[in-house]
Amino acid sequence: MKLEIKPIKLPLIKKGDKLPLIIHKHIEKHKKTDILVVSQTIISKAEGRTKNLETIEPTKEAKKIAEKTNKKPEICQLILNESEIIALGENYIITNKNGLICANAQIDQSNAGPNKAILPPKNPEKTAKKIHKKTKTPTIITDSIGRPFRKGAVGTAIAYSGIKPISNYTNKKDLYNQKMKTTTQCVADELASAANIVMGESNQQTPIAIIKGFKHHGKPTNRKINRKPTNMIFTPKTPYKNKNQK
Amino acid sequence: MKLEIKPIKLPLIKKGDKLPLIIHKHIEKHKKTDILVVSQTIISKAEGRTKNLETIEPTKEAKKIAEKTNKKPEICQLILNESEIIALGENYIITNKNGLICANAQIDQSNAGPNKAILPPKNPEKTAKKIHKKTKTPTIITDSIGRPFRKGAVGTAIAYSGIKPISNYTNKKDLYNQKMKTTTQCVADELASAANIVMGESNQQTPIAIIKGFKHHGKPTNRKINRKPTNMIFTPKTPYKNKNQK
């Protein structure tokens, strides 16, 4: 298969905007076999998930974390509100938000506005379904997520609708007509990464992309990409204990 | 930017084949601004890095690991020869090979031939440079690598030549004309993932891909993508101790 990945410009999204409708209007000419990739930032903005840092009153714990991590106490408070902190160090806070392990609970100060922060969307799965329904296009919601053993963030599928996120080649035939051993490929994350290249990180104002030419492997599923915590092979070197956490 | 990603068919590669020349002949019509992505499997094959499992005599340690992990003792021996084992469990062996943390030391039985295994290339950085020089095209060597917290493997840049692997947006302006905080994006891995979608995992015989339309951010560098072990936030839950390892 041959892929084509095109960024699409949108107007600046603000609180209350009907995102599925706006996106639908901007991608009307596409084919139904395409895949739509949407940056989570604009979902958060439409949901009004932008916080003015001046309105946040950090607790003692947030202040303590801020000191340890060289971050603003207000940001640490938002992270505490949004996630379970699992590790922290001089310049990082690693969080677990519903199984997604990443830095700073996906809270972003870039593209948020002066002294503001954007929180992650409330329910990206639900939003993915809504956008999919309105646009009739399989949809992936993405964020740029760091990795434990590799530098630099990469586009990652936070939620999706209408696709099979993981292709399984187990028992398919290889080049020598031998059955393949367990080989699973996370196409949802690969598509998210591919789209992230064209969507960019700074001021391009292209928060969605259309991927043309992707051949789906099998029926759409809701299979989760995050590994279950019980199956984790790696744990934080210095785990964080938060007394207030459940 | 708009991307186009095209898989390219090659003849079956065998030991002694001059890979840079073969690839050059198959991509002659491309532009010099394109990016070439090459699956590491064909490099290993050209280097004769295919092992017949019948010729391997597993040591006591390999047999012990095989029992614990439900793998063939011969495969465990190859893993011991090729890497430092850092963790193992019922169905997995996690290895560190020159800083690349992944499963099974990148040793692959798929597409290797009956009762054979393919070892990773000897020096992928050197090969990336050679292919780059011959084809005049920036080159990424890829493998499908699993992730600690996410299911499914994704195309990952094992080596590269002629590109800047990590884009740094720190201090660039965001949508609101504010300076961005530290935002680094691993474009090399994103390009590897994008190419992996079209190259496929089983019997498609398309081990290379051409990416058109990528706009480079800055000058090529040799910057390493792997995090240094001293900076690791996560460590194996049950580390493996190998007495024979340095």
Image (cartoon, coloured by chain):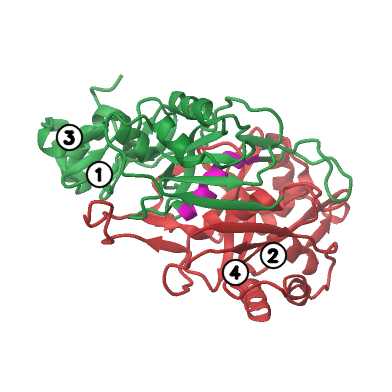
Chain colours: A green, B red
Amino acid type at circle 2 is: Pro
Q: Where are the magenta residues, as a range?
A: A185-198
Task: Tell me the distance, in whole angstroms, between the alpha carbons under discs 1 and 3.
Answer: 21 Å
Dominant secondary structure of the magenta stretch? helix
Subunit that carries the residue with mark 3: A
The quadrant where residue A124 appears: top left
Q: Are marks 4 and 2 on the same chain?
A: yes
Q: Are marks 4 and 1 on the same chain?
A: no
Element at label 4: loop
Where is mark 1, residue-wise? A112
Nearer the observer: mark 4 or 2; the answer is 4
Where is mark 2, residue-wise? B121
Subunit that carries the residue with mark 1: A
Task: Tell me the distance, in whole angstroms, between the alpha carbons under discs 2 and 3.
Answer: 48 Å
Q: Residue at x 68, y 58 (%)?
A: B6
Q: Is residue B196 above or below residue B219?
A: above
Residue sticking out furthest to the top: A246
